[in-house]
Image (tube, rainbow, N blue to C red):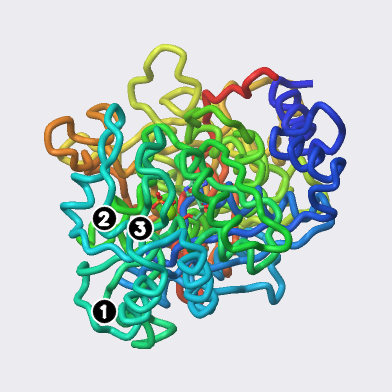
Amino acid sequence: MSTDDKIRTEAGEERVAPLNGENKNFIEQEIDKDLAEGVYDHVHTRFPPEPNGYLHIGHAKSILLNYGLAKEYGGEFNLRFDDTNPTKEKSEFVDAIIDNVKWLGADFGDRIYYASDYFDEMYEIAVKIIRKGDAYVSDLTAEEMREYRGTLTEPGRLDPSRGRSVEENLDLFERMKNGEFADGAKTLRAKIDMASPNINMRDPIIYRVAHLSHQRTGDKWCIYPMYDFAHPIEDGIEGITHSICTLEFEDHRPLYDWVVREAEFAQPPRQIEFAKLYLNNVVTGKRYIKKLVEQNIVDGWDDPRIVSISGLRRRGFTPESIKAFVEMAGVSKSQAVNEYAALEYCIREDLKPKAPRMMAVLDPVKLVIDNYPEGESEELEAANNLENPDLGSRKLTFSKNLWIERDDFMAEPVPKYKRLYPGNEVRLMYAYFVTCTSYETDENGRVTLIHATYDPATRGGDAPDGRKVKGTIHWVNADDAGRVRARLYENIVDEEKGVYDAETGELNLNPHSLTECRAYVEPALLQAKAFDRFQFIRNGFFCCDYKDSRDGAPVFNRIVSLKSSFKLPKK
Ligand code: ATP
Ligand code: MG
């Protein structure tokens, strides 16, 4: 068994969902406890994106976690747009998010919801809270609000409007709704505790005046609920049991619970926080990705160099590989940073047995077999994937004129070089042994043509006399090869310099993040369709680009090279 196989077996085992006992993550343990204690008799989760950008790999973790829990416990999973802030939200993002969530396999069926559909109920709940004397309309400006809030070491000061009567608050809140006040002139605040050590509990704003048109509700509303007020209500209305979010909301949980109590939901939802997924040296922040898109530094939100879900998909990642990656990253309360190499590992493992292995020459130089008859050709059989016989085999043609990789030849070989050089014999994969006899160069010394002779007795790649060669190289037949565009990628940011510039905070861009080459490929590859994935032998895994490919003229994006220094973490 090779080391490769061992890794695969281990990874295979890791991908099995941990359904039994102590292998459960802390969220599963909490859910088990809730079910055992009868707090809930079922599980209902949701993924609540704000439609203000494209989703990225971190969101994939949240999607798969929430969906996975619903599935594991036989419960339900909602996709809900948290569209309570109209300024940055667009329906283009809504469509892309729906698409991404479906693609990841998180099946929400017809359970798709919009927070904006609850604006009436949210308003009614706010009125109810005012009636209880637990919310009031404030006249403080944003700046005054900041001053009154206090600091971590000093308590806040009481808002002069805090003592308003219920009647006055009801009247003012209604007038806020009716558009009588300018943006920022009034807010509705929860009456909680200005001396709370938790600043989120110091009479937080729950509604603001904002004369904004909303993409779904139009001009109906000129007041909008704040996130901390809206979110628990959305969860409560939908009957969510476990509202799973990321750690930065831990300090907001007391407020979440306050809103849920005040709203008096029959079955109050509960918030559980986990650590965000971070990728080392990779740009994930929406703000930065947006900039790359808006400044046309990348080809839209689905540029294969960015880790938006659309970008990963276009690059050629599979939902299975993303799932394996987030499972490997695990669910925890403590912040960890994951390596992009781990994601690459997962896609290699996924594609190794699935993708046909074909020959493509990315940086071609011509090889002539001088003793092969001019004008003749023959067919050779090549397995499509030695690891997976189900993928069958194909016919390759072989002739006198071939293309090979420029770096598979050295006029003056460095020590230990095993591929072609004058006098050396190598195997042309699936074909023959060939020996380099000479080469030609142009006036700059660049190799233009390599001469070789072949041994007809080695057909299929083995010598009957048992002699061995140290190198095997790939090739394509120049007489019938297709010519295609192939793109190679590096990190969009310069890892050496650091992702962010220390002074300006801007991204340090890597000028070499995209290289396009004109490759020669086996003719069968010309039939590739969007999202078809292949291993180009020795060059990596490639995916047929869905945007730029045309019938008979595919463009290939390299998903990942074949080499890796990634080691699976020990469990
Ligand atoms: P960003 O901070 O990148 O702009 P966001 O948190 O503003 O993302 P939302 O649309 O509010 O984006 O997020 C939807 C859900 O995805 C939330 O529940 C959020 O906690 C979760 N989420 C966002 N980023 C990550 C991440 N890196 N890892 C895991 N979950 C995440
Ligand atoms: Mg957010």
Q: Which residue is mark 1?
A: 211
Front residue (pair 528, 131): 131
- Residue neighbourhood size for the residue with mark 1, other residues' Cα within 10 Å, grouped as few (<14), some (14–19), many (≥20): some
| Mark identifier at residue 292 | 2
User: Along the horizontal axis of the image, is 476 left or right of 487?
Assistant: right
Determine the residue positioned at 42% across, 48% down: 362
Give the label on residue 175, or none.
Answer: none
Q: Quadrant of the C terminus?
A: top right
Q: Secondary structure at mark 3?
A: strand
Is label 1's Cβ within 8 Å of ligand 2? no
Q: Disc 1 and disc 2: Cα gap in Å?
A: 30 Å
The image shows residue 414 at horizontal and vertical percentages of 37, 16
The three-letter code of the residue at mark 3 reads: Ile
| Helix, strand or loop under label 2 | helix
Would residue 479 be visible to someone looking at this image?
no
User: Residue at coordinates 64% horizontally, 55% vertically from top-left?
Assistant: 396
Residue furthest to the top: 415
Q: Is residue 154 above or below residue 46?
A: above
Question: As shown in the figure, which amino acid type bears the numbered disc 2?
Answer: Leu
Residue under pointer 3: 205
Q: Which residue is nearer to you in this view: 511 or 126?
A: 126
Counting the numbered discs, the total is 3
Closer to the chain start, of discs 1 and 2, is 1
Of the two numbered discs 2 and 3 in the rendering, the one whose residue sits closer to the viewer: 3
Residue 260 drawn at (x, y percent):
59, 57
* Residue found 27% across the figure and 73% down from its top: 210
Q: Amino acid at mark 1?
A: His
How packed is label 3: few (under 14 Cα within 10 Å), some, or many (20 or more)?
Answer: many
Residue 105 point in image, percent of width and height: 68, 61
